[in-house]
Image (cartoon, rainbow, N blue to C red):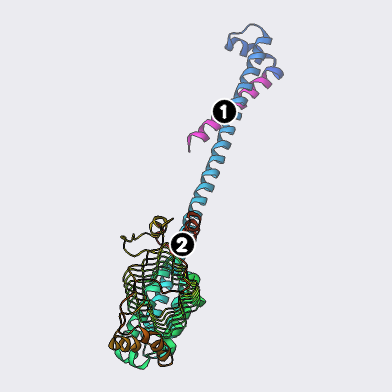
């Protein structure tokens, strides 16, 4: 028996005793005298008052005890409810954790299956694996870069094989073209903000119109005859890439690294190359009409036979040290006059060099390029813009620079690159 029950029993007994004494006092004549004597009270009224106060005190104590009991019971209920809530929360957390673990396991399984299928002998199975991985990347943002790395690695490995290059000299295989379209055209949102590595890939004749390739590593890639019209290539590394006869009209190449790139007979009309590094590049017979080259670096570039009608050469530089930062390239050339003295615009070619240049050009374009280059054979090298070239020279303004920098920052912000 606990303390509460003992106290309750004692108080009830005292209450019964007090009430019994009170009744005896009123009913039994001799009881009043006896009680007064025992209590040491002389007056009947005093005795009656004492008994009433005693009974009331017992009732108050009993009520307090019952209130305490009720409070304890309520506290117990509240504690039980709190414990139940804690248990429920714990159970919910465990369930959520189990669900996450199951989902993570499912994702890893999908990733494993996709990678396994991409390495399959069958082209259809490989493409199916690529679709699996792309859907996984759509569902899980943290897996986008790994998925892109896997598929870019597959493209590099596939196109790096000698048998592939012999078989697909001027056009990509259906598999490679499908992957390029999936990654950089139809699903452009997946690649934004990610690192694209296609260094050294053999992508001649690839259809990459309006492709998203900001900041992409395409160094030493083969892109002869590729369709890159309107492609986003801001900040891309195209150093020593082969881009002969490539379609680059309207392409956005601001800040791109085109050092040593071969752009003979390429179409760059209306392309944006502000702040691009074209050092030691070859642009013989290239279409540069209305091309934006403000602030570009062209030391060592070869432009014999190029169409320069209305090409923007304002602020072009040849001899100063060229900064790595796009912002610096553009801002340091504000107000600077055109300097093309480091680039070759005429002469300086031998018959052997012309034939070597034509080796990287498709047959249907080779004759037209030969006609453009033949007048430069055996002639003295010229470092001046041809007379009546139509190129626009001079300096650009701070307002122009701010506009180009803002556009570049927006593009490179999406690519997750350093905007400096």
Q: Identify the residue position indicated by label 2 in the image.
A: 408
* Quadrant in the picture for residue 196: bottom left
Against 409, is 154 above or below? below
Q: What kind of secondary structure does the magenta stretch mostly adopt? A: helix
Answer yes or no: do the residues labelled 1 and 2 have beta carbons within 8 Å?
Answer: no
To which residue does mark 1 refer?
11
Please count the marks in the image: 2
Q: Nearer the viewer, residue 197 or 55?
A: 197
Judged from this view, the residue extending furthest toward the right is 27
Q: Nearer the viewer, residue 219 or 397?
A: 397
- Where disc 2 sits, the SS reads helix
Q: Position of residue 101 (x, y in %)?
A: 42, 66
Q: Position of residue 137 (x, y in %)?
A: 45, 72
165 vs 281: above or below: below
| Quadrant location, the C terminus | bottom left
Using the image, tell me which numbered label, if any, was put on residue 310: none
Q: Is residue 392 left or right of residue 154?
A: right
Magenta run includes residue 19: yes
Check disc 2: other Cα within 10 Å, few if <14, some if 14-19, many if 20+: many
Q: Is residue 214 visible?
A: yes
Please identify the quarter of the rendering in which residue 173 is found. Answer: bottom left
Q: Position of residue 213 (x, y in %)?
A: 44, 72
Which structural element holds mark 1?
helix
- Mark in front: 1 vs 2: 2
Give the Cα distance between marks 1 and 2.
89 Å
Q: Which residues are drawn in magenta?
A: 1-24
User: Does the magenta portion include 370?
Assistant: no
- Do we see residue 161 in this rendering? no
Q: Where 368 falls versus 302 (above or below)?
A: below
Please, is residue 400 above or below residue 374 in the view? above
What's the residue at 38%, 59% (across, down)? 329
């Amino acid at each position: 028996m606990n303390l509460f029950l003992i106290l309750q029993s004692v108080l009830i007994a005292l209450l019964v005793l007090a009430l019994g004494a009170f009744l005896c006092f009123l009913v039994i004549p001799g009881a009043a005298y006896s009680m007064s004597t025992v209590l040491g009270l002389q007056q009947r009224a005093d005795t009656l008052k004492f008994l009433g106060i005693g009974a009331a005190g017992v009732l108050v104590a009993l009520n307090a005890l019952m209130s305490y009991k009720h409070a304890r019971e309520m506290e117990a209920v509240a504690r039980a409810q709190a414990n139940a809530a804690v248990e429920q929360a714990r159970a919910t957390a465990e369930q959520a954790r189990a669900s996450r673990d199951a989902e993570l396991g499912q994702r890893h399984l999908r990733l494993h299956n996709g990678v396994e299928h991409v390495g399959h002998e069958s082209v259809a199975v490989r493409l199916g694996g690529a679709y699996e991985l792309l859907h996984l990347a759509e569902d899980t943002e943290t897996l986008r870069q790994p998925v892109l790395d896997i598929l870019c690695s597959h493209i590099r490995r596939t196109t790096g094989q000698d048998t592939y290059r012999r078989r697909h000299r001027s056009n990509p295989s259906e598999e490679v073209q499908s992957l390029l379209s999936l990654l950089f055209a139809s699903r452009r949102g997946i690649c934004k903000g990610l690192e694209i590595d296609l260094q050294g890939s053999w992508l001649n004749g690839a259809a990459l119109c309006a492709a998203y390739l900001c900041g992409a590593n395409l160094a030493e890639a083969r892109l002869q005859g590729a369709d890159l019209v309107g492609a986003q290539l801001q900040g891309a590394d195209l150093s020593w890439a082969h881009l002969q006869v490539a379609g680059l009209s309207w392409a956005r190449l601001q800040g791109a690294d085109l050092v040593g790139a071969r752009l003979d007979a390429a179409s760059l009309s209306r392309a944006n190359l502000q702040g691009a590094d074209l050092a030691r590049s070859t642009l013989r017979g290239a279409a540069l009409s209305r091309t934006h080259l403000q602030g570009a670096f062209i030391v060592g570039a070869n432009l014999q036979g190029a169409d320069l009608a209305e090409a923007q050469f304002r602020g072009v530089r040849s001899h100063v040290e060229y900064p790595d930062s796009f912002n610096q390239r553009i801002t340091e050339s504000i107000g600077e006059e055109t300097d093309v003295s480091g680039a070759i615009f005429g002469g300086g070619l031998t018959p052997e060099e012309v034939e070597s240049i034509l080796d990287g050009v498709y047959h249907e374009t080779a004759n037209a390029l030969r006609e453009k280059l033949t007048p430069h054979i055996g002639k003295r090298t010229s470092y001046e813009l041809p007379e009546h070239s139509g190129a626009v020279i001079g300096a650009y303004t701070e307002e122009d620079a701010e506009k180009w920098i803002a556009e570049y920052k927006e593009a490179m912000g999406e690519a997750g690159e350093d905007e400096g």
